[in-house]
Image (cartoon, grey):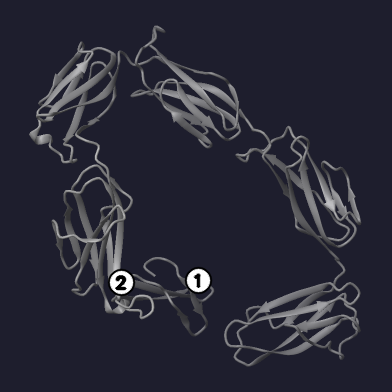
Amino acid sequence: MDGVEIQDQLTITQTQISGTILLDGGPHSMTITIFDGTDAQESATVDFNVDMGKIDIVEPEPGAEYNKVDIPILVNIVNMNAATIHVELQKDGGSWVDYTGDVTIGSDTITGELLFLSEGDYNLHIWGTHPNHVDPDVNPDGRVEDYSFFTVELIGAHFEIQLDTNTITAPGEVNVDYQVFNAAGVDVTGETAVSWSVVPAGGVTINEAQQKLTFVEPGFFELKLSANVTAAEFIEGSAFIWVNGVTPGSVEVELNTNQISAGDFVFATATAYDENDVEIPYTQFVWTTFPTYGVTVLDGGNPAMIEFTRAGTYTVRATAKGTGIFGEAQLTVEAGDPFAVDLILPDPVINEGEFTTPVVFIVDQYGNPITTVSADITVFPTTGVVMDSPAAGDITFNDNGAFSVTGTAESPWDGLHDTETLTVIDATAPQIEIWTPERGLWVNDEAVQVHGIVNGCDYLNDTIQYSGDPLVYNLMAPPSECQFDASIPLQYGLNIIEITVTEFSSGLDSTVSRSR
């Protein structure tokens, strides 16, 4: 449906597909494809329209925070059939108010602005009615609606400054784009005179008309913009530019430590040098690690602060911005303190007389295996259990039943443990074979003849059943073969035939099934 698989929502038989699908109002497309068990297939597609109205608020974006008093509104309207559309606004959980500002309600959209809003939390409610949505118990009016919660928080008059880059090599240029907003969050750039300055002023040329800075000397510079938004309101904004004197010849990286535990962080410091091994000041760096998993760069400055949560050996790299020159340092991350025990059984079910070899992992809070802490393994009950060692090795089970296998960390972490259940079965329990009908057989009848054999059974005492109803063994077959032959009733659709035999001596059940 509309490109999404929906077969798990439907009931499918050989002659009918049925079920209920929840759809929005509007156009939809459904494709049904039938496979014949080979590569051949047949498909059919039907396009249809659901005459169920829908209202979808696009703007204000739900959950958004706006720093202005005029908020754009865009609402999509689908199949509302010329219904009357209502626009309501609520502030700070107060009363709902019909909004009649700069809003245009069309047949398929609502556009405009919510004007002159003050600071606060708002809820926009758009609704109408549609006859196909009427539910006497839940929605008697047939209301179709949508909500959008948003916040208005004014931050006062301010600059927003964007640089095309904040790191260059002298001589070089930086392009500047900016906007000026008044206290209401309205863009007043075109009507505001702006003054430019750069600190320090040496080695830089300002071209206000082209909004461009040209640097001929290295250094760390601050661009300052200032303006009077009103006669009484003066604002400033700034941005920083790093100018390298030359392209580095090399980069060195130093760590405050070369070994930490998972969950800790390191401080990494990078230094750039020219081809004469003279340090290049003001160089900025991009920090990366190899591998990258379990790594968070908490602070990408210089020094950088980098956190590691996965154990292993890492390479910490600093690359001079705007160049391919980098330096590296190695870091070893050890697993942290024990946090949990994970016991794994190779197979949760074994035969009586066989052995299993449990594997126990002790991990820290980030899932890193800890190899320096051992664990003991215990089994309950202990009847018929033979262990090579409490710490490791094979465990042999000479009795059947359910056993609890527990791995416990050594002291002082012996409060950490994990338990799995192992089922030991009697390998001599009867085994069932259904000879006919074959699996997946198609029949056009009310019953099917089921024929099979029980290997290793007690002809006189072991009981055989179909879906809880007792069957009888075929007395015409040799007693040693324990054959059965029964007519099993069928229902329309897929049938599962399940035969169960219960061993008299142990009470153990064996079950086998066939789908028809």
- Secondary-structure class at tag 1: helix
Disc 2 residue type (three-letter): Gly
Quarter the C terminus occupies: bottom right
Amino acid at circle 1: Asp
Rendered location of residue 239, percent (x, y): 26, 25
Residue closest to the eye, 5 or 32: 5
Instruction: Give the left or right position of residue 449, taking residue 18 as reference.
Output: right
Q: CA distance from mark 1 to mark 2?
A: 22 Å
Q: Is residue 267 left or right of residue 281?
A: right
Badge 1 or badge 2: first in the primary sequence: 1
Task: For residue 21, say whether it is visible.
Answer: yes
Q: Which residue is mark 2?
A: 25
Up-down: is 301 above or below 119?
Answer: above
Q: Residue 52's spot in the image, x, y percent?
A: 30, 74
Q: What kind of element bears circle 2?
A: loop
Task: Establish if 318 lies above or below 506.
Answer: above
Report whether 412 appears left or right of 440.
Answer: right
Name the residue located 90 percent from the left edge and 58 percent from the top edge. 398
Can residue 26 be seen? no
Query: From the viewer's perspective, is the residue at label 1 or at label 2 nearer?
Result: 2
Could you tell me which residue is drawn at 73 percent across and 42 percent down? 416
Of residue 219 and residue 89, the one placed in the foreground of this image is: 89
- 269 and 481: which one is in front? 269
Q: Could you say which quadrant of the image residue 126 lies in? A: bottom left
In front: 446, or 174? 174
- Residue 8's mark? 1
Residue under the image location 89 percent in, 77 percent down: 504
What crowding class fits label 2: few (fewer than 14 Cα within 10 Å), some (14-19), or many (20 or more)? some
Tell how many labels.
2
